[in-house]
Amino acid sequence: VKVFDQKGEYLRTIGKPGQGPGELQLPITICLNSRGEIIVGQISKISLFTPEGEFIKSIPQTFQGFVEDIDPGDNYFVTILDFEQQVYKVQKFDQELKPLHIFGESPLPSVEIRRTGKRRVYFPVIRFDVLSTGQVVCGYADEGYILKIYDDSGKLIKRIEKEYLPVPVTQEDKDIAREEYPERLRDSLFFPDEFPPFIRFKVDDEDLIYVSTYERPPDGDGYYHDVFDQEGKFITRIVLKARPLVIKKNKLYTIEENEDGYQFIKRYRMIWNLPRGKN
């Protein structure tokens, strides 16, 4: 895990390859808890480090999935791959990774492949993010343009719904998508007539919800993103060239790719031209 300052200058490396104390094996996700400790999600465990990079401890996990988020009480949130029930599950765990609540689920792609013999491109899976209140926002695009907000015990307390114009899947879209699959799988691909209403969403540090759609502006540069407040009120629609990874302190972080195919993290400054807090 590499640490950089605000200007992108390298500071230090945390951990090293291996399976011993403080060593990492296929690190996939990184989160910070309320104490600023760094939680690194891996295949079979999570590892905790101080902000300076000193190893604290590792906690083994019994589920298939990676810690993706942490609530204000330092509980962990994971998208579980439940192969027995053939579903993805959004589930909360306590600080010792003991299971607490399930907030939603969606089928694994294998269910549809067995049923139809085809692989649906743009297959939606359940998405989630956590508000500063500990409430959880979940959405499964096969249900429509609907986001569900749950309290910290898993009780549904609110729904956000929005009308939208379906975006057709063009031949160009199909040609581009086919290139992302191995040649041996391309004959088994199934393309829907329309894209799902959204691909994912992110919550910023002010609890605004940014929903990434498949709809493009007239010049085709970027995608439309709908912005809602935590009460579900629609605020605005903006165009972003890349889908948000993190939004914090009016900075937007994305993962982009250069002409040589290398991925990098890019930070944008966000400037609002509408009154904040009076939406």
Image (cartoon, grey):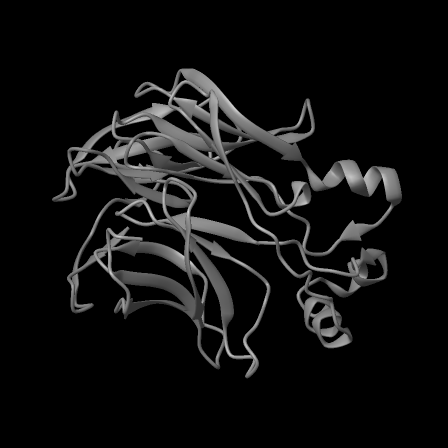
Give x and y (percent) for residue 115.
86, 38
- In the rendered view, tell whether residue 260 sits above or below residue 160: below
Q: How many marks?
A: 0
Residue at 80% across, 58% down: 189
Residue situated furthest left in the rendering = 52
Q: Nearest the camera: 106 or 275?
A: 275
Residue occupying the point 84% across, 38% down: 114
Give above or below for 140 relative to 11: above
Q: Does residue 203 appear left or right of residue 237 in this picture? A: left
Using the image, determine if residue 181 lies above or below residue 105: below
x and y percentages locating residue 273 in the rendered image: 27, 69
Q: Residue 131: where, in percent of width, then height? A: 34, 37
Near-viewer residue (5 or 273): 273
10 to the left or right of 153: left
Query: Is residue 269 in view from this perspective?
Result: no
Query: Residue at 77% of width from left, 65% of height from top?
Result: 183
Quarter of the image holding residue 96? top left
Give the quarter of the image for residue 188: bottom right
Residue furthest out toward the front: 278
Is 109 situated left or right of 198 in this image?
Answer: right
**Where is 153 relative to 89, above or below?**
above
Q: Residue at x 37, y 23 (%)?
A: 152
Residue 101 visible to the viewer: yes
9 relative position to 215: left or right: left
The x and y percentages for residue 274 are 28, 65
